[in-house]
Image (cartoon, rainbow, N blue to C red):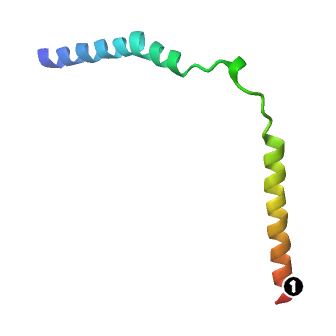
Amino acid sequence: MATQEDRIKQREALEDAHGNFVEPYINQLIEVNAQSLPNIDVALPGLCYVSGWLALVLLYCFWMRSRG
């Protein structure tokens, strides 16, 4: 039973070490400054691009259907 308790204590120590030392370091590495990001609006051009392709595909499908 002592080995079971030792394993539990070791696991708790590792979890504490991760929470106290590793996690803040990782958060610091992946933190992104919102000021440094370029302000690029890609939603509207992307929507137009996809809508254009969809319209072309639908027109092609209707054209092929009317031919046959």
Residue 11 x, y percent position in the rendering: 27, 18
Q: Quadrant of residue 59?
A: bottom right
Q: Residue at x 34, y 16 (%)?
A: 15
The residue under label 1 is 66
For the residue labelled by badge 1, is the local secondary structure a helix, a strand or a loop? helix
Give x and y (percent) for residue 40. 78, 33
Residue 57 in the image: x percent, y percent?
Answer: 79, 69
| Pick the front one: 41 or 10 | 41
What's the amino acid at mark 1? Ser
Report the side of 50 relative to 30 (left or right).
right
Q: Dot 1: within a 10 Å radius of its alpha carbon, few (fewer than 14), some, or many (20 or more) residues?
A: few
**Mark count:** 1
Classify 45 as above or below 9.
below
Residue 36: quarter of image: top right
Is residue 60 placed above or below 39 in the rendered structure? below
Residue 42 position (above or below residue 28): below
Q: Residue at x 57, y 19 (%)?
A: 31
Q: Is residue 37 in sight in this rendering?
A: yes
Residue 42 image offset from top left, x and y in percent:
78, 40
**Above/below status of 20 relative to 46:** above
Left or right position of 5 against 19: left
Q: Residue at x 83, y 67 (%)?
A: 56
